[in-house]
Image: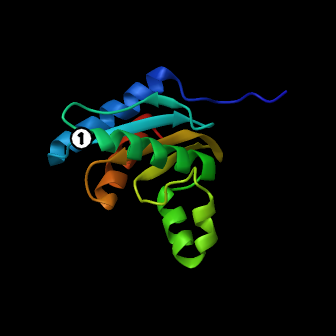
């Protein structure tokens, strides 16, 4: 039987806290979604972030977890292959990163509220805080 590593609520809180530090340091009002490997929500949204950012952050996190890669890759694939639009459960926008450890996807982090590269910068800060 295989032992599976998973993100815990404490891991999600650590990721979210590091994302908040990075967002606050830059003056960005954002939402951060952390999901497990099946795309199920563990945490989301900071104070003063606009309401629409929470849904976008969640979709970016789900996309990163389901694809086992950055949501920006889906954005790039869509430009070359319009059939990617058929995958309605994916959001092809930069700002979602998978939480990968030892080649295994534990989940994803999605951020929304600033420019796409800034969203990804904040997501990366969360993963770095977790050591992945």
For residue 101, above or below residue 3? below
Q: Which residue is mark 1?
A: 50
Q: Is residue 27 left or right of residue 108?
A: left
All told, the count of numbered labels is: 1
> What residue is shown at x 48% (from left), y 50% (from top)?
97
Residue 126 location (% of width, % of height):
38, 40
| Vertical order, 108 against 17 (above or below) | below
Identify the residue at horizontal 61%, vertical 37% (top origin). Answer: 37
Q: Give the image location of residue 83, x and y in percent.
A: 63, 70
Front residue of 63 and 120: 63
Quarter placement of the N terminus: top right
Q: Residues within 10 Å of mark 1 (few under 14, many from 20)?
A: some
- According to the image, what is the colour scheme of the structure? rainbow
Q: Residue 128 at what x, y percent from top left?
A: 40, 43
Residue lying at the far bottom in this picture: please name it.
Answer: 80
Q: Which quadrant of the figure has residue 88? A: bottom right
Residue 19 located left or right of residue 27: right
The residue located at (17%, 48%) in the rendering is 26
What's the residue at 51%, 42% (across, down)? Answer: 108
Q: Residue furthest left?
A: 27
- Of residues 81 and 110, the one drawn nearer to the viewer in this rendering: 81
Q: Secondary structure at mark 1?
A: loop
| Viewer-closest of 56 and 120 | 56
Q: Quadrant of residue 19?
A: top left
């Amino acid at each position: 039987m295989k032992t599976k590593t998973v993100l815990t609520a404490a891991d999600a809180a650590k990721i979210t806290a590091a994302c908040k530090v990075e967002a606050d340091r830059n003056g960005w009002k954002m939402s951060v979604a952390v999901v497990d490997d099946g795309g199920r929500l563990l945490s989301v949204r900071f104070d003063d972030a606009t309401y629409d950012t929470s849904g976008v952050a969640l979709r970016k996190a789900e996309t990163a977890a389901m694809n086992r890669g950055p949501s920006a890759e889906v954005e790039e694939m869509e430009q070359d292959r319009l059939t990617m639009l058929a995958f309605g459960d994916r959001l092809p926008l930069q700002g979602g990163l998978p939480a990968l450890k030892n080649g295994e996807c534990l989940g994803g982090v999605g951020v929304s509220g600033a420019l796409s590269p800034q969203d990804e910068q904040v997501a990366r800060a969360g993963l770095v805080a977790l050591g992945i």
